[in-house]
Every structure is written in C-alpha cells, then in structure tokens.
Image (cartoon, rainbow, N blue to C red):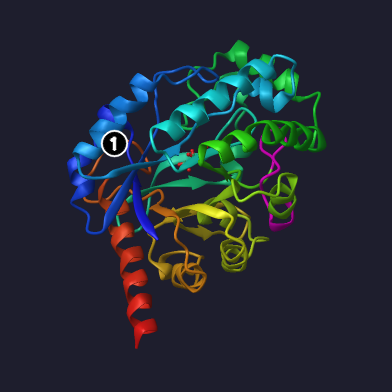
Amino acid sequence: MKLSFRWYGEEDPVKIEYIKQIPSMDSIVTAIYDVPVGEVWSMESINKVKETVEKAGLNFDVIESVPVHEDIKLGFSSRDKYIENYKQNIINLGKAGVKVICYNFMPVFDWTRSQLDKKLEDGSTALVYYKDQINKMDPLKGELSLPGWDSSYTKEDLKDLFDKYSKIDEEDLWTNLEYFLKEIIPVAEASNVKMAIHPDDPPWSIFGLPRIITTEENLDRFLKLVDSEYNGLTLCTGSLGSGSFNNIVRMVDKYSAQGRIHFMHVRNIKLLDDGSFEESAHYSSCGSLNIVEIMKALHKNKFNGYLRPDHGRMIWGETGKPGYGLYDRALGAMYIAGIWETLDNVNKE
Ligand code: DNO
C-alpha cells in the first residue's frame, strides 16, 4: 500500500512540505487545474507539477482527475475529438511517469453534499448529505454553491445540460461509457497507465440525472466492459458506503483480490435512518464503516496500489477547502498507516 495525499497545487492552503512531514507519505495526488475540461494538458505544465512534487520528496504517480467532457457522457458526435484529447492526456501523463489516473462518469455534478459546515457535537465541522435539504434544492434555480458542482456553470449552461440529459437514460450512459473505454483502455495499456474510475457520490440518481457506478452489480458490469487490468477502480469507501445496500468490506475484498483496485479513497461516514449521511472521522467507531476490516481485506490481498485518506472534518480551528484540510486528513493517514503496520507485524509473528 502506498500512502498518498491530495494536493490542489500552489493555490492549496495546505503546503506540500507539510504533507511530506506525515510519516510514510509516498505520493501526491493532484491534477492540472487551469486547462478547460476536454482539452490537452501540455507536457510543460505536467512536468512543472511533477518537478514541484519531486522536489518536495514525494512521487508524482497519481492524477485525480482527468475529467471527462459531458459530450462523451452524452454520446454526441463531438465526443470523438474529446476522446482523442483524452488519449493524448493519457499518453502525456504516461510519459511523465504517472501510474494511475482517477476519473468519474457522473453526469453534470461530481460529489454532492447538502451542507459543508455542519457543526458536530465535538465542535468540528463536516460535510453532510441530508435528504430533506437536497429535496428542497433546485439546481436550475441557480442554488449552486457546493464544491464539486462546477461553479463555472451558468444557469443557462445547466438548463441546457439538463435538457440534453433528459433524453438519455442509464442504459444510454452505459453505452457511452463502453464506447469511451474501448477507445481509451488500449492507449492506457500502451502507456502503462492504469485507469481507475471513481464511483458516483452518492451512489444514486440526483436531480433526475442518471448515475451508474453505484453498486456491486454495476461495478461487476463495469469491469467486464473491458476486461483489462488497466480498466480498474478507485474504490471510495465513503461514496459507495453511503448506500446501505453496499457491503464495502466484501467489495474491497473482491475487487482487490481481482487486482482491479488501483486507488483507494478511505473515509468514514455515519449513516442516518432516513438514508442521509454525515461524514465522520476515519476512526471506525465514529462512523458506520469498519475501517479495520477494510484494511484487513486489502492487506490479505497484498494491496500494492495507492491509498489516500479521503475527506476530513475541519478541526482545531483550521479553515480552507471543506473536506480537504490538513489536520483531520493527516490524522486519518496515520490511523490507516497504523492499522497497516499492525497487520504487517501481526502477520510476521
Ligand atoms: C471528492 C472526490 C471526487 C473525485 C472525483 C474523481 O472529494 O473524491 O471529487 O475526485 O469524482 O473524478
């Protein structure tokens, strides 16, 4: 297991030197943030980030994310041009030594929460998804202020996108995903870059938009679309785990045994009775997921991919990007590394 940490580049309030100070930290997970979705990342900009990461003593092995243009998800004829650009990005990143690319296939919105600063009992704040809050939201009325919801969308753009998606259903989305994978996976194989799709967060349809990377059954289907090791998963425990229908330990065990998990996002959530959830500290008893069992499954299968502590709460007065502060993610990293070290030692005895 290679421990990694997401870093948003020079603009990130979390300094890269601080990340290096976390014991056993191996890699930075980052992206090129100033190129519009669908365009090619230049070798120059890739190499610049690589240099910064390596200068800090960390590896530049994982990209999160190379975003997929909506025309590809919608299956428009313009997709071919964007797919060619996507392939070029895989080639360029492969040249720079990148080993894993994380991406997602969620229409319009990436991860979605109803509130970013919910005060928990201990005074920390966390990201939450309360169904009653979501039900009151109407993205077409312009109530968009959550991260992951591209703030560059105007109300008109959104209306237009919603109109386009109203004409396609889940099966169409599967067809468009398959088309995309059949094009890009051979390039990933040739470039020795493993593709790792991120599950939909939360794993159900929101605002009437189709979502398909949601359940074990669908992940099985996804992996069969192109049966190559290079067509793999980012297994995000918190995303899949927010559906009580998903058995995360079983999924981690199954897909790591198959060698199809290239990147793990580990975080915990507290499931509430009505299907809502709150993000919690990584520590197992703070949430509904058993992180020790998850790590045991990975360890048993000799997981050799990348793992990052996912969202943390905001603690100790830290401010900054919700979910992506230094302190709670660093606590999460050490908790995870501690479990791993223990498993290594116990297995030696
Ligand atoms: C949220 C992240 C996601 C993830 C993308 C991958 O914090 O896990 O935004 O980066 O879905 O494409």
Per the picture, the main secondary structure of the magenta-coloured stretch is loop
Q: Residue at x 80, y 28 (%)?
A: 168
Picture coordinates of residue 331, whole percent (x, y): 28, 58
Q: Which amino acid does label 1 sit on?
A: Gly
For the image, the number of numbered tags is 1
Question: Which residues are the magenta region?
Answer: 205-218
Location of the C terminus by quadrant is bottom left
Picture coordinates of residue 203, whole percent (x, y): 64, 47
Q: Nearer the viewer, residue 39 or 311?
A: 39
Picture coordinates of residue 215, whole percent (x, y): 69, 54
Q: Is residue 275 above or below residue 348?
A: above
Q: In this view, does 269 lie above or below 74?
A: below
Location of the N terminus by quadrant is bottom left
Viewer can see residue 136? no
Q: Residue at x 59, y 66 (%)?
A: 257
- Magenta stretch: includes residue 83: no
Q: Residue furthest top?
A: 156
Would you identify the image quadrant in which residue 201 lies? Answer: top right
Horizontal relation, residue 271 to residue 121: left or right: right
User: What secondary structure is found at the residue carrying circle 1?
Assistant: loop
Horizontal relation, residue 161 to residue 347: left or right: right
Q: Nearer the viewer, residue 213 or 278?
A: 213
Q: Which of 277 and 203 is in front in this view?
A: 203
Q: Residue furthest bottom?
A: 349
Name the residue beneath numbered marker 1: 320
Picture coordinates of residue 223, whole percent (x, y): 69, 50
Q: In this view, does 158 lie above or below 225?
A: above
Q: Which of 321 and 216 is in front in this view?
A: 216
- Magenta stretch: includes residue 214: yes
Viewer can see residue 154? yes
Q: Residue at x 61, y 13 (%)?
A: 157
